[in-house]
Amino acid sequence: NAGVTQTPKFRVLKTGQSMTLLCAQDMNHEYMYWYRQDPGMGLRLIHYSVGEGTTAKGEVPDGYNVSRLKKQNFLLGLESAAPSQTSVYFCASSPGQGRTGELFFGEGSRLTVL
Amino acid sequence: AQRVTQPEKLLSVFKGAPVELKCNYSYSGSPELFWYVQYSRQRLQLLLRHISRESIKGFTADLNKGETSFHLKKPFAQEEDSAMYYCASRGGGNKLTFGTGTQLKVEL
């Protein structure tokens, strides 16, 4: 099993450009999450999903959109990138059902917005 | 809103010395508390959860509801313990709130 896979691992964007980060998990997990990691800020939740076709806002959702059309995939979109969105993005999945706090993380995607 | 506080950005100890990474949470109910660890060039991974009351790699953490704390402890630090440690809390919903993390450096 690959676990949680994120693509791409690195990306450089210009201000105003758009992009999509893809997260795929092969563990049949119900819950999926997108976090961003910034120095001194820890991990902050952007959006999450508790099942196929569902999404919900996290702590810092502005400027991002997500979709969960298939259970195994969770996409994070930036419609118009801003320098403040320069960060490392982590996707995670969780079995839910009593194990909601047990997150399995991807390797991270480093995004730089110029 | 839930809040998880890790007061130390960096903790430096010598090999063989005791380690205590501090974590305080703010939640009026009964939260679930976790410690996650990120070793260099590895993924963030779950280290332990309070309801398991287990010791992983020599680390333990006890939930103290009176002090709203969940400090991570190890009696004798090893070089391989050097990593970034995150405390996290789940307060009844489907979200996990993380602290800002503590970088542990074990010196020889």
Image (cartoon, coloured by chain):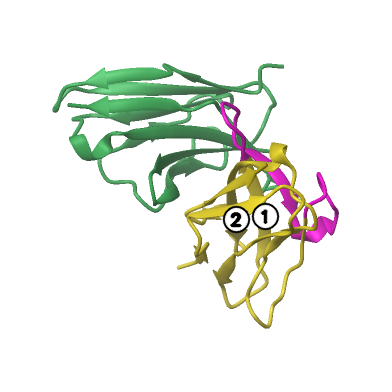
Chain colours: A green, B yellow
Q: Is residue A74 left or right of residue B17?
A: left
The residue sitting at the left extreme is A16
**Residue range of the region highlighted in magenta in the rendering:** B38-59
Residue A97 visible here: no
The quadrant in which residue B54 appears is: bottom right
The residue sitting at the front extreme is B108
Given contact means CB atoms under 8 Å apart, are the residues at marks 2 and 1 in contact?
Answer: yes
As drawn, the label of residue B34 is 1
Q: Is A26 situated above or below B89? A: above
Q: Is B40 situated above or below B56? A: above
Residue depicted at 51% across the width and 60% down the height: B8
Magenta stretch: includes residue A80: no
- Residue B45 in the image: state x and y as whole percent: 65, 38
Q: Chain of mark 1?
A: B
Mark 2 neighbour class, 10 Å CA radius: few under 14, some 14 to 19, many 20 or more? many
Label 2 sits on a secondary structure element that is strand
Label 1 sits on a secondary structure element that is strand
What residue does disc 2 label? Answer: B87
Residue depicted at 51% across the width and 65% down the height: B5
Residue depicted at 44% across the width and 21% down the height: A22
